[in-house]
Amino acid sequence: MTTSEFVFSQGTLDLSRPGTGDPTLRAWDATDELLLEKALEVAADVEEPRILVVDDQFGALTLGLSMFSPTVIGDSAVLRTALDINASLNPSLPASGTVYSWLNPPRDLFDLVVLRIPRQADYLAWLLRWINGVMADSGVLLAGGMIKHLPAKSVEVFGGAVQTEQVLPSRKKARVVRCRKGAASLEGWSGAWKGYAMTGRDGRVNVEALPAVFAREKLDIGSRLMLPHVAKMVSIADAGSSVLDLACGNGVQGLEALAQRGDLQLCFSDVSSQAVLSARHNVEKAYPHAHAAFTHCDGLPSEAGLFDLILLNPPFHEGGVVGDHIAMRLFEQASDHLKPGGSLLMVGNRHLGYHRSLRRYFSSVQQLDANPKFVVFLAGNR
């Protein structure tokens, strides 16, 4: 990891971005600068302000506001890791507390909410409705993002959920919006869950997901190519085999495994807490008696145990950064968590050349299937 200096209106932080050694990938951007500047201005006008930071990326917002002991919630498990690392680089700051996720959201009321605007319009709409439920009547919402990454129709999304007071002048291609609490809530909102149907062991299975989850409204092309191979692999697995759906999303790969075999030991893991919630929701509805566990984690912790089969459709983007750095880390972890004779079954974008990457971590790599965009591989260690 490379450390860079983040200078904002009230000081300087040393910050690093976990999971990559690329020195061009910083742990902060102009959105963090602008949000911190405006947040500190608002906080100065409130006695003992109760501050909530939502979806901070790598800790710049949380550490920049540390003098107020902000409450922090993030969908991504990366945030907890990044905060631990970056807090250690800035030991003079107050210690950060609990990092909440959507598995255990805070229930307090806040005078100031600082939000990094997500790229997905549905997730933004979900967040704004949730924020309305935790913001004090006199509270202020500051929402910011890089202009090129703002979701389509974001003006309409804000207008439908909160009261926009001011769109602040852009700076360094970043934008911040100041808002007040609106009337919209999550209760009864039709946009919370969306999904599709697939064929299961006992007929049609509805696969649903919350807004932060990849491909929540239709089966993605990569998963469609991989699913028949999941069915084949689990059909010949030993009774009670342990299967991990890594980077599970809505859990569709693990659900396919359960559709074929009810005796499997399934684990679903994802960096997104909304993905974990969605996978659990789908398994509990379709296969309530399944032997299933659910983990919110950035990859796999060392104590995760060993698996007979790991299923993986790796993400190839993190925020606005596209590449294979996430997949490389997941390949290495998968190799460390396979039982002797175990296999990794994965699908990936053809242009990323995963056949070469997999050979860094597995002695056996076999191509099972391909289409113009995706390739399915089976990898293991002899």
Image (cartoon, helix red, strand yellow):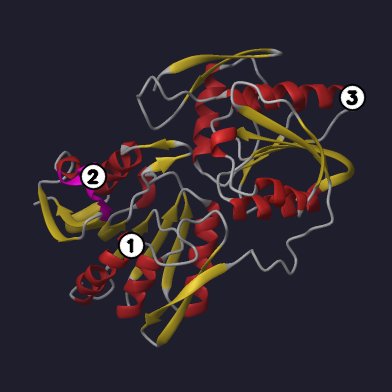
- Amino acid under label 3? Asp
Pick the front one: 325 or 143: 143
Residue 106 appears in the picture as rendered: no
- Asked which secondary structure carries label 3, the reply is loop
Q: Is residue 1 left or right of residue 62?
A: left
Mark 3 vs 1, N-terminal side: 3
**Distance from the alpha carbon under mark 3 to that under mark 2:** 52 Å
What residue would you read off at disc 1?
Answer: 221
Q: Residue at x 54, y 31 (%)?
A: 58
- Amino acid under label 2? His
Pick the front one: 117 or 233: 117
In x, y percent, where is residue 353? Answer: 20, 43
Q: Residue at x 79, y 58 (%)?
A: 184
Numbered circle sitting on residue 78: none
**Distance from the alpha carbon under mark 2 to that under mark 1:** 15 Å
What residue would you read off at disc 3?
Answer: 45
- Asked which secondary structure carries label 2, the reply is helix
